[in-house]
Image (spheres, helix red, strand yellow):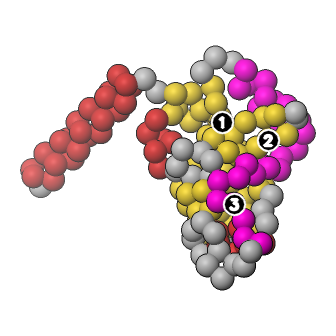
């Protein structure tokens, strides 16, 4: 069954070096699922953290469901992520290292279940970003020059 991507955090790949990625389930209420299926999720500014042996996702915005009633959900509530205990403890150990953090990359539906792809990431410095932009520009110039010769 194909994967239906709901939302992506494009800025994460720009701001961080992605070291490793993981897939985690996400605990949602009924109106959150309906809202996500409608494509009303946003991962900007969101992050994950291990607390008391559990993995939590903070600041993921899921808009309230249009047809929802008074039982509608709160848009930015913390949401529990589901992973195996061993993986969570491994992530907890890795995030204790200096400069490593957990960043959600995308939210999607796989076999009817909502999943979040989280990454173990290291923040980029300003000069790292500038180098990346310069390399991309140089590559573009080379491709442009090669196209002009043919």
Identity of the residue drawn at 77% across and 72% down: 71
Q: Which residue is mark 2?
A: 55
Q: Which residue is mark 3?
A: 74
Residue stretch in magenta:
71-96
Q: Secondary structure at mark 3?
A: loop
Q: Nearer the viewer, residue 110 or 43?
A: 43
Say if mark 2 contacts mark 3, CB within 8 Å: no
Q: Is 134 displayed left or right of 85 in the figure? A: left
Q: Secondary structure at mark 1?
A: strand
Q: Is residue 22 above or below residue 8?
A: above
Label 2 or label 3, whichever lies nearer to me, is: 3
Magenta segment includes 56:
no
- Alpha carbon separation for disc pair 3 and 1: 23 Å
Q: Is residue 37 above or below residue 86?
A: below
- Alpha carbon separation for disc pair 2 and 3: 19 Å
Label annotation for residue 102? 1
Quadrant of residue 91 within the rendered picture? top right
Q: Nearer the viewer, residue 63 or 27?
A: 63
Percent of width and height locating residue 139? 26, 40
Say if mark 1 contacts mark 2, CB within 8 Å: yes
Q: Is 149 displayed left or right of 1 in the figure? A: left
Q: Secondary structure at mark 2?
A: strand
Q: How many numbered discs, if any? A: 3
């Amino acid at each position: 069954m194909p994967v239906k991507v709901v939302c992506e955090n494009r800025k994460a790949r720009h701001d961080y070096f992605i070291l490793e990625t993981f897939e985690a389930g996400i605990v949602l209420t009924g109106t959150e699922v309906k809202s996500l299926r409608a494509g009303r999720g946003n991962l900007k500014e969101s992050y994950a953290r291990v607390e008391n042996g559990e993995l939590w996702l903070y600041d993921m915005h899921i808009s309230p469901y249009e047809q929802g009633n008074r039982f509608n959900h709160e848009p930015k509530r913390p949401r529990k992520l589901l992973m195996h205990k061993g993986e969570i403890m491994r992530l907890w150990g890795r995030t204790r290292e200096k400069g490593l953090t957990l960043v959600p990359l995308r939210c999607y539906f796989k076999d009817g279940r909502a999943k979040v792809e989280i990454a173990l990431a290291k923040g980029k410095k300003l000069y790292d970003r500038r180098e990346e932009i310069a390399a991309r520009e140089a590559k573009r110039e080379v491709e442009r020059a090669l196209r002009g010769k043919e």
